Amino acid sequence: MMRKFLKPLALLAVLGTGGFLVVASCLYLYLSPKLPSVEELKEIELQIPLRIYSQDLKVIAEFGEKKRSPVSFDEIPQSMIDAFLAAEDDSFFEHRGIVVTGLLRAALQLVTTGQIQSGGSTITMQVARNFFLNNRQEFTRKFNEILLAFRIEEGLTKQEILSLYTNKIYMGNRAYGVGAAAHVYYGKDLKDLTLAETAMIAGLPKAPSIYNPIANPERALQRRNWILGRMLLLKNISSEQYQLALAEDDQASYHGSISELDAAYIAEMVRQEVIEKFGLKAYTEGYSAITTIDSKLQKKGVEALQAGILAYDQRHGYRGPEQTALPEEQWSEILGQTSTFGNLEPAIVSDVAADHLTLLNRNGELEDLNWANGLKGLRFYKTVNSRSAPITDAAEAFSRGDLIRVLRQTDNSVILAQLPEVQAALVALNPQDGAIRSLVGGFDFRQSRFNRVTQALRQPGSNFKPFIYATALNSGFTPASIINDAPVVFNDKNLEDLWRPENDGGKFYGPTRLREALYRSRNMVSIRLLRRMGIDRTLEGLQAFGFETGDMPLDLSLALGSHAMTPLKIASAYNILANGGYLVSPYLLATVVDRDGNIIYQANPDTVCNSCESDAPTESTNSVANANSLSEVDMQLEQLLNSLASESIAAEERQSLEMIKRALQQQRIELKPVAKRVLNEQSAFLIDSMLKDVIQRGTGVKAKALGRTDLAGKTGTTNGPRDAWFSGYSPQLTVTTWVGFDSNALIGRNEYGGSAALPIWIDFVREALKGKANIERIQPDGIVMVKIDAATGKRVGPNQPGIFEFFRSENVPEAIDDEVLPGGSESGLPDDIF
């Protein structure tokens, strides 16, 4: 009886097997030619975001849809490998691409339910699908996976396959690969993850949304613990390790973009420049953009600017809580949704006592704000020029349910603060080549993306005067030239009404030497000096400092800095004074490197070369020589790259050519064009000497606290006042600071460049020049020191009372009454000026 059935069954088995082989062969013959080769897999380039770095390679930001930090197989911890194999494919190192039992299970599910529920895919098959196929659950796709898996196993090592998998797999929250996942969920490198965190990440590929530890912590924890159990079963970990990992609380939270430096304004500037140079592909090609930013200076720049803004805010009074009478049941939710700006944390008043507040912070903890930490002496803002009387009881200012801001101290105590309305800007430049060392465009980029360093057009006021004076020195005036500081009314056709300019304070001081007029910031002297030189002549001189003069006013208000410009433009002009008279342009992007380490962009800024001076004072012939050298190097590089493109080059020869290429690239970097001299050496020395007196005895005297003798600069305050400036430098660094309102509102009658902007400058420069020696400017040929009468500016004898002043050799004043200054009259001024 059995034989009767065995024969047909055997026949059916043979026919079924044959049929299967025929179908499989047909599918193979049909699908195989359409499948990609393993070589494509070897050459495939993963999408890597654009990363921006400081000069000392601190990560500033990354831009790109996919967050990915590729890692080599050797960089993946063994515990991570074990966790993935336990979760996805524990026989990975034994099979040849597929596991038959898994495929049969998946096939059965497809026949019975119409869907493949458990997958049955090995890691090799997942690599095939992730790189070349779609995620649709179809028989032909699964067959393609199998064929590709065989090809991959033949062409790649197990280590290469696993490396591709761990770098490609999607992990949720825009993270692709284990390196990115470690940063996004835990803010760590792979090597720093705990065993529990490793298992959590290994659980993500199966369903990144369902097992996401941030969005779905309970399901994620179940998946993590299951993987730990699998690792224990496979003897990857000990029972003790298993128990410790199970007991560990998960600390996953979204860490966003990797950033080691608060430099969001810089990041946005660089992002725009890189996209302009390379297009949208820069977001995915793994470019590294290295900036000129010094991370230590940037950190201090942010701290100094924020401290200066908060100090201004405190001087003008408390404007009250941000929100009031918040329902207690919403406190936690409101705190979670309220952003921290500039380290100013939100907190809600839970209880009010006479001498302290009890606050609920974002961590759900209660803490006290004591009387001495901002409540004592607290005054309410009334107007920009007035405040209320100090409060005597905390209940006068606060109620339960108020949302306020606090600033956390190093001892973890908090002091009262508020979000500022005033803004500020800071930029620091290298005088030698214009490299931007620090740039802070406002209190906090998240609060306002408007970059005040590059976008805010503000009147510089007296901060502009040094360029009027430098132009005068270039035109034959001297630091001892006498200009009358006296009232005058101008009926200028270029001005709407009669103009009655005056000095700050409304006083006038009579005949004044230019040096004193500059360090005391005498407005009338600047106006008369401009009128003496003439508008056209002055505008021509200002062009040397890089100013676009086409839009400047053609009237005497120019002398008081009435033409609006950005802080970066002002800093760039001061940089010329700092380096001794050379035009260098500010730049931020230094180098762009591709994913293979090749330099694809290198800044080549004009650079000061004091040893390159030629007989022509306006331009160094060495810049031409350098240009020729650069051209030769570029030609050699082009020829070399053409040679490397040839496939006939032997391996040893190619290696040698690659070395030569790197050497030529380095040589090109080192050959920089020489900056053009735009202010002669003698005038540069004289204006520098005058600006040093601003700090030693003038409106910038607070900077004497730095204890340096190589600092020079100038304050600036505009009408109202509405803007406060300080720009200053040493031979090593140029820094401009600005304070004001975006709305151009008044900043207060007691706010000046010396009180609002200068403290930020001092705070920053103290750290920037810490440990750096004073560099005294060498007195150039053609400059002599002469003893003069302080009142008249004329030369006196060695035994007569007087002061010493620097002059050009050809401008030394005579010790006679009929001295003639540039222009013709004995005073050096037209008679109608007095």
Image (cartoon, grey):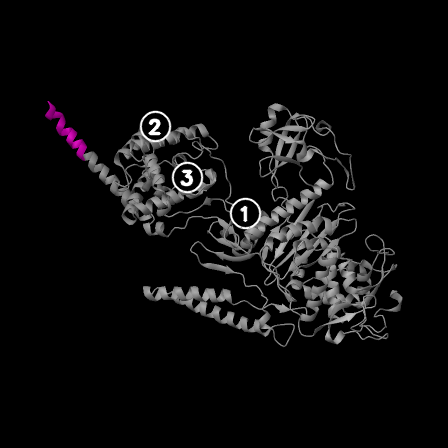
* Residue contact between numbered discs 2 and 3, judged by CB atoms under 8 Å: no
**Amino acid type indicated by mark 3:** Leu
Disc 3 designates what residue? 193
Give the x, y percent position of residue 237: 32, 34
Quarter of the image containing the N terminus? top left
Count of numbered labels shown in the rendering: 3
Q: What residue is at 76 percent from the left and 64 percent from the top?
A: 515
Judge by depth and name the residue closer to the eye, 403 or 137. 403
Give the x, y percent position of residue 78: 34, 41
Query: Reading the chain from its start, which is encountered first: label 3 or label 1?
Result: 3
Query: Magenta region: which residues?
Result: 1-14
Question: In the image, 189: left or right of 779?
Answer: left
**Amino acid type indicated by mark 2:** Thr
Q: Secondary structure at mark 3?
A: loop
Give the x, y percent position of residue 516: 78, 62
Query: Reading the chain from its start, which is encountered first: label 1 or label 2?
Result: 2
Disc 2 designates what residue? 113
- Is 101 contained in the magenta span? no
Question: In the image, 783: left or right of 123?
Answer: right
Using the rendered image of the protein, determine whether residue 763 is visible from the camera's viewpoint.
Answer: yes
